[in-house]
Amino acid sequence: MKLSIRTAGVAAAALTLAALILPGSAGAKPWWMRGVESNEGDFLDPDVAYRAGSRVDGDVLRVRWVIADGYYLYRHKMDIKPESPDLVLGEPAFPRGSIKTDPYLGTQEIFTQQVEATVPFTRMDAGAHPIQIKVTYQGCAEAGLCYPPITKVIFATSGAAPAPQVKSHPWEGVAILGGGFAFLFAGFLLRKDRHLDTPAV
Amino acid sequence: MKVQALRIGGGVLVMLFGLWAGLRVYVSHAPKRAAVAVAPAAGVRVAAGEASPPVPSDFDAPFDLGVGTAVTPGGPILLKIPERLPEFTLGGRTGKPTSVAAWRGKSLIINFWATWCAPCRHEIPLLQSIRREWSARNVEVLGIAVDYRDKVVAYADELKIAYPLLIGEEDALDVARAFGVDSPAFPFTVFTDQRGEVVALYVGELHKPQADLILSVVQSLNQNRVQLPEARHTIAEGLRSLSTKQPT
């Protein structure tokens, strides 16, 4: 029995080691290698580089852009317009951005990482239509690529709306099963009343 | 006692494995790097830059991010780069229609740009110097501005851009599409040899080492010292090497 416990320990160690060493077959880079192997250097699709969303917060709309690392948006190119009928928007309020000085374009206010604008709104339709707004934005990658202005129509979600769904990943099932199994196995190994030694005959 | 330690050690390792599996799923849920360009069937697509997309924790608030209907197209998506320089005609600085055939027999550096694009402006002095340096070797720089004519002409005059410019709006976008670039982002630059074969397409701001590398290979191609597939391969490898050596 001692041998089997030792074998289990060695097997668990080997399993863990193998899992740490073997790269992901799904192509996802392990977290500890991020930024090390990325020498391909492709630019992001603009819908990945810049993600816009909106939600209702009382009598204001909050419009948020999440901006990928190494990318930025120009403040003066950002605009929010009503799209649904009978929606009236006030002047959007943006936080102060950072200043980027370009030898050719001069000084510009830009946003990186994340920015949230608030827009007061009134509805003349007593809530008959979903709130839709049209957002326009334009930005560039620090590495030297600029996207043309992007205009999108987005729905404003209510404050209680669920977080956006994330597509399930092929590894998810494996990880859930593996994780569950691992904890069960760990529990089995660690249980207090376990008889470890072969009873003397 | 030893057995107890082994038991605990084994249990901890197994728990670590479970933790690792969970972390792995979390990390792999980050939106995948969407290559702006897919490997082209012809030509060498080269993109510069380094970035990671936003991570899931950015979306913890109840925002519905990333949805919406695109009213205007987004960014650069390469379709299929043509093997040969496509035929096209655009207005020049004065508006006079000019065909690309006017430069037949030359190696072309076709630079797509716009006045609102900072990196496009950055690379114009480089393109000017390339033209000075390489024009004796049958190389011509051709700018294609996807922009309003008056803005382009004013800017070209201000910078004294000496190389030929073709200017267009929707028609210039059609030309970009003819090069396999749908919904373009700027700048991007196409290199052809003097036979009109598309050798490389470089996405993003061009820098001197990259330009010199591509042009030297194009020159070898023009002198029949290498074949086109080998030339493309050399460029791809060389640019990969450059991108690891120096940040753009």
Image: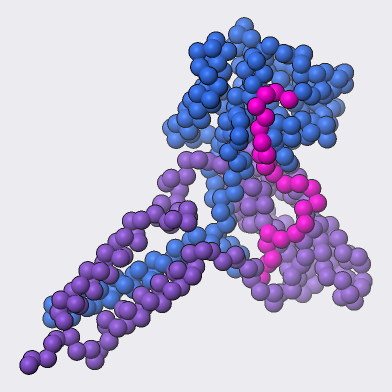
Chain colours: A purple, B blue
Residue at 64%, 24% in the rendered image: B198
Q: Which residue range is magenta in the image?
A: B61-86
Residue at 72%, 39% in the rendered image: B182
The C terminus of chain A, quarter of image = bottom left
Q: Quadrant of residue A108?
A: top right
How far from the left and from the top, in percent, is residue B109?
A: 65, 21
* Residue A139 sits above or below residue A173 on the image: above
The N terminus of chain A, quarter of image = bottom left
Q: Is residue B74 magenta?
A: yes
Comparing B157 with A130, the one in front is A130
Q: Is residue B163 left or right of residue A37?
A: right
Q: Is residue A46 magenta?
A: no
Q: Is residue A43 left or right of residue B65?
A: left
Comparing B157 with B82, the one in front is B82
How far from the left and from the top, in percent, is residue A167?
A: 60, 65
How far from the left and from the top, in percent, is residue B160?
A: 73, 17
Q: Is residue A133 left or right of residue B213?
A: right
* Residue A50 sits above or below residue A169 on the image: above
Residue at 77%, 57% in the rendered image: B69
* Residue A197 sits above or below residue B204 on the image: below
